[in-house]
Amino acid sequence: MSVTSLAEKFVEHAASMTAPSRVVWCDGSKAEYDSLIEQMLADGTLLALNEHTHPSSYLHRSHPSDVARTEQLTFICSRGRDDAGPTNNWMAPAEAKAKAGALFRRAMRGRTMWAIPYLMGPAGSSMSRAGVMVTDSAYVVASMHIMTRVGQVAFQHMRAEDDFIGGVHSLGDLSPERRLILHFPEEKLIWSVGSGYGGNALLGKKCHALRIASWQARQEGWLAEHMLILGLEDPDGRVTYFAAAMPSASGKTNLAMVVSQLPGWRAWTVGDDIAWMHVDAQGQLRAINPERGFFGVAPNTSPNTNPNAMATVRANTIFTNVALTPSREPWWEGMTKEPPRGLLDWQGRPWDPASGPAAHPNSRFTVLAEQCPSIAPNWEDPQGVPISGLIFGSRRTQVIPLVFEAFDWQHGVFLGSAMSTETTAAITGKVGVVRRDPMAMIPFCGYNMADYFQQWLAMGPRLTRPPKIFRVNWFRRDADGTFLWPGYRDNVRILKWMVERIRGTGRAEERPIGYVPTVDALDLGGLDIGRERLREALRSDAADWLPALDDLEGFYGGFGNRLPVEIYGTLADTRRRFGG
Ligand code: GTP
Ligand code: SPV
Ligand code: MN
């Protein structure tokens, strides 16, 4: 492999700081992956699973205090504080370097440093971007092999010597007290120390492909989004592509792999977590999936909810923090009705149901996308796929209807900016607390979100046929706490209505919040759901919405006059339509 001299310099500099006993450049080969696995089996980082039921699959148990993203330890270190904005933690670059520098100093002594050149996006795509990260974690290297394209292909994509994002990662001592995840967008640099967990440590994913990429996208006129990408094929074989933003652990992987209940309709998976979207020369929005694999939530994945994910993880999969059966098979809550006897919990102790779930609620699988039965034949098309519909979804027990459509692009951007959601186990902290999460990007937007809304607004006029924008909520509940909508595979019914709206045939009523499907507009064939229940799922009234709009105004106020006037204007219009 030929390494460019700037990449070499970057790695040498990281090595002089962390003092590893040796530096190994990764080539991304299968032999390299196999030897990493062998090494981790030998030192106990991985346990081999049942070779008959789960060939070439492994269990990794992480440190119990290192099981999810830690947002309070994640910082945007732009030169100007205002450029990070009120929704990000900010630290001055010099202070950040001093703090993390002390943690990195000689952190790799006696250990191997791997240097990983990686590409985010399909080979041969002008939308793909390269990175070079170093790490002292074999688990991170093996995961990067699955989640990104590692090796020479990264250098082939650099348009200049310095055309890469640099990343420095060390496990440190895994203590949250000595953990920092730092982004220096002006230097195209990421520093992460003290965590081995996915979003904190696989620097190509949230750090590069969202926080740094969103900063670059703003400057270059594109969008880096926390979105799945899927194609929905109709009975005539026509495929309509959607990109959908939903907060962490709120349904992207499930929707991306959905198995249709409707005869003749089928979904094709393009990506399950991140979308990079550009306007092409014809004014069409096109999206690529920058990733190569899935880092998916295990709990509640079952042959019922997500058969495609179950089939995907049958082999060549690394499981993290799931439970283990006596026959060395992985298990998690929701996989089967009854837990098998004799389970070891995610920390390797005999499972005691009184001490909590057997699998960690944020336990995950890491697996190549190409193993997914529903993977789209064109998922690695360098041109990306043409997007006709954009979806913003969140997890709300109340207020937000099952589905509705924005009046136009500007209104759709407003709906995205107005999202809030209930927190999940994907981040440390309390679960189920409602928080603001515009476009599902609150943890991932690498710059001032007021500017981000402006970026979204500015995309509309550049598009010849702007995608229709929809808002969904699979998580609304009745007074007894039961989900009003069955969700999962029945979500295809909602996608079908969206396709009909895009084609101009779907029926809807105009409401203050947008176009809401009439009860008979949804294809409910074979589904046992009462009209009253569906009406409740679609309900939107002033009594719920006016207070919610007041709360939203308070959130917007945090951006001061940096917030685009269009956003305030659309808020005022909505209030007026409700008679408020
Ligand atoms: P990240 O990988 O963290 O970004 O998560 P994700 O958005 O891909 O979420 P995922 O699809 O893995 O879903 C997480 C959890 O949401 C699942 O375990 C389910 O509990 C729940 N979920 C997903 N889809 C539905 C749905 O349609 N209805 C209901 N009720 N729950 C759902
Ligand atoms: C998320 O939390 O949104 C994830 C998992 O997709 S992580 O890679 O940890 O960010
Ligand atoms: Mn995610």
Image: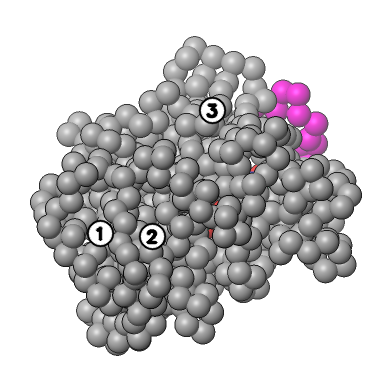
Q: Earlier in the sequence, mark 1 or mark 2?
A: 1
Give the residue type at disc 3: Ser
Label 2 near label 1: C-beta < 8 Å? yes
Q: Give the residue number, with chain letter if any, for mark 1.
A: 165
Residue matched to label 2: 203
Q: Which secondary structure class fits the magenta region best?
A: loop
Looking at the image, tell me whether mark 3 or mark 1 is earlier in sequence order: 1
Is residue 524 covered in magenta?
A: yes
- Residue that mark 3 sits on: 374
| Residues drawn in magenta | 523-532
Above or below residue 571? Residue 151 is: above
Q: Is residue 82 visible?
A: no
**Residue 414 covered by magenta stretch:** no
**Split into 4 quadrants, where in the image is the C terminus?**
bottom right
**Where residue 386 sits in the image (x, y, percent)?**
34, 31
- Residue 381 point in image, percent of width and height: 32, 29
Q: Residue at x 64, y 17 (%)?
A: 263
| C-alpha separation, residue under disc 3 versus residue under disc 1 | 31 Å
